[in-house]
Amino acid sequence: MSKTKVTLAIAASYFIFAILLNSVGTVILQAINTLGVSKTEASVLEGFKDLSIAIMSFVVASFIPRLGYKLAMLGALTVVAVACVSTALISDFYAFKILFAAIGCGFAVVKVSVYSIIGQVTGDANSHSSLLNTIEGIFMVGVLSGYWIFTAFIDPNDSTAWLNVYYLLAALTLIVITSVIAAPIMPAIISKTKRSGWFDFIAMLKLTYQPLVLIFIISAFLYVLIEQGVGTWLPTFNNEVLKLPVAISIQLASIFAAALAFGRLVAGQVLKHIHWFVVLSSCLIAMAGLILITLPLTENVTENTVISLFDAPLAAFILPLIGFFMAPIYPVLNSVMLSALEKHRHAAMTGLIVVFSALGGTTGSIITGYVFENFSGQHAFYLSLVPISLIFISVIFFKKRTDAISQHATTA
């Protein structure tokens, strides 16, 4: 029962942050349409979100175990609730910069805590990978919900009506805070060696010198570059390239989140029977194939009257399905990496995961926004073939290193 309460609390925390973090694509589209900002200027919102994640993770990841996961999560959620209410009241573009900075800082704290708690409530690599994929799947359900929650508040006759969504999100965050308070989250696992928090911080930095960690960091950076590049700009792609209305553009972008959620939930079961390397290799090949097949369908689309989802062109439904094949990559890499480390090092490793994932997300959004504005939406999405190829290479090296570690552990 206690394990169930803990699982529900961390799942609920991930769910609310999923809505907030991935609303950046919707906010970018709304900022372009209602606030008159350019695509390049709007893309900085991703930077406020992701760089705050990176900085916060880099600074506090090694200290969170000493503070306590429950207290850390409660503090992060409280700050986000206040930021949501403030954004609705201020209603200006600079307020969104502050909001996403607060969301990023809060998510950094929550992610480090959640990943570390998962290591405490699971006993082996398979159960760890399964629960992590399930939690990440719930995260994507939150992303999917977010698209529809935001569109429910969009009024073509009132450009500011959609800001009221933040009152609802603040209320939902308060409910999550209650669930965390009720959860019997165990104290952090800290190395028995007596040392300062700064020693742990240095230890986190030293992890980057390990070849396996370095290969993993490159893989995670490239993956998030793709996911954020596609996910953040898909609503704008639907609106400007496929000539769809704003509300329908956002709703169709939810297919991407649905595909990611479904893919991760399916992967949680598939990985019990098929080796992770086979799964990831197949997914990467499928991603590249889908891009090459679908993007030509988005060329020279004429503007037609679209009043419902079913009036949209076929490409609007096919392109977001890349999320299904993308889905297992990130949680599997995270799980394999964490399973290769001692549990007292999970918080430090998660800090590195969040830092380089955030840097990848910011890079992906800025590059995609720049190419979108100066070339075309198709060029921006074709560009994802480059990091897909690089991930395939890095995953091969990642497998070789993990196999070598396993063999060494067996013979030791």
Image (tube, rainbow, N blue to C red):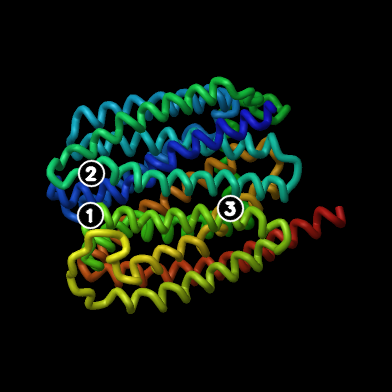
The Cα atoms of the two marked residues, 1 and 3, are separated by 29 Å
The Cα atoms of the two marked residues, 2 and 3, are separated by 30 Å
301 up-or-down from 201: above or below:
below
Label 2 is placed on what type of residue?
Ile
Count how many numbered circles sit on residues in the image.
3
- Residue picked out by circle 1: 246
Label 3 is placed on what type of residue?
Leu
Residue contact between numbered discs 2 and 3, judged by CB atoms under 8 Å: no
Left or right of 43 in this view: 328:
right
Looking at the picture, how far across and down is residue 250, in whole percent?
Answer: 30, 53
Q: Secondary structure at mark 2?
A: loop
Residue at image point 69% right, 48% down:
339
> Residue 253 or 304: which is nearer the viewer?
304
Label annotation for residue 154: 2
- Residue 33 visible in the picture: yes
Q: Residues within 10 Å of mark 3 (few under 14, many from 20)?
A: many
Left or right of 113 in this view: 405:
right
- Residue picked out by circle 3: 265
Residue at image point 52% right, 72% down:
286
Residue contact between numbered discs 2 and 1, judged by CB atoms under 8 Å: yes
Label annotation for residue 14: none
Which image quarter: residue 196?
top right
> Residue 23 or 193: which is nearer the viewer?
23
Q: Looking at the image, is mark 2 or mark 3 earlier in the sequence?
A: 2
